[in-house]
Image (cartoon, rainbow, N blue to C red):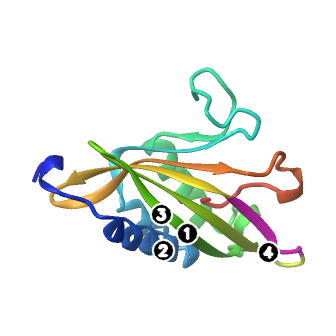
Amino acid sequence: MGQADLAVTRAQIEDFLYREAALLDAWQLDEWLALLTEDATYRVPSNDAPGADPRAALFTIADDIARIRARVTRLKDRSAHAEYPPSRTRRIISNVRIVGEEPPRAEANFVVYRFRRNEDVRQYVGHYKYEFRVVAGKLLIAKREAVLDAMELASLGAVSFIL
C-alpha cells in the first residue's frame, strides 16, 4: 500500500499519538520503537533556535534510527542512573492537527509531567511535529520533533527520557 492509498484523518492521528504517549509513559520502549520507520529521526531542538537545521546548529537531541535504538538500549539498562528506576511520566496531548498530506504530517501540543524520586515534579511543555509514512499498510513515524516552550532547560533538568 503506497502513501497515497491512505487518507489519514485527524482521528487516526490522534489515536496514534495517544497510543504512542501511553507506550512511552509505560516505558514500553521496544513497542515504541516498532512505531518508527527504519530511517526515522528524533529531534529536540535547542530553545534559542527551534527552527534550526541540526546539521548547522546545536540540538538537545538529534538522533537517527541507530542513535534512537542506542538511546532505548541505554534507558533500559539498570546502570543508566539518570533513569533507574525509571521516571514516572504522564503525557497530555492536545490540539492535534494535520498540517500536510504528502507525506502525512501532523502537529500537536504536549505537556509531559515527570516524577522522579526526591525531586519536584517537572513539566515539559511544547509542541510535537511529526512526519509519517505508510509501511506495509501501517502508519509509522518517519520524523518526530519535540519543540520545548521553555526558554532554558536548567530548571527542567536533564532530558534523560524520551520526550
Q: Residue at position x 70%, y 32% from top? A: 49
Q: Between tags 1 and 4, which lies in front?
A: 1
User: Is 96 above or below relative to 99?
Assistant: below
The alpha-carbon separation of the residues under discs 1 and 3 comes to: 6 Å
N-terminal-most mark, 4 or 2: 2
Q: Amino acid at mark 2?
A: Leu
* Numbered circle sitting on residue 96: 3
The alpha-carbon separation of the residues under discs 3 and 4 comes to: 28 Å
Q: Residue at position x 66%, y 37% from top? A: 50
Alpha-carbon neighbours of circle 3 within 10 Å: few (<14), some, or many (≥20)? some
* Residue occupied by mark 4: 116
The alpha-carbon separation of the residues under discs 4 and 2 comes to: 18 Å
The magenta segment: 119-125
* Numbered circle sitting on residue 94: 1
Q: Do tag 4 and tag 2 residues touch (Cβ < 8 Å)? A: no
* Numbered circle sitting on residue 23: 2
Q: Nearer the viewer, residue 107 or 78?
A: 107
Q: Do tag 2 and tag 3 residues touch (Cβ < 8 Å)? A: no
Alpha-carbon neighbours of circle 1 within 10 Å: few (<14), some, or many (≥20)? some
Q: Do tag 1 and tag 3 residues touch (Cβ < 8 Å)? A: yes
Q: Secondary structure at mark 3?
A: strand
Residue 123 part of the magenta segment? yes
Q: Between tags 2 and 3, which lies in front?
A: 3
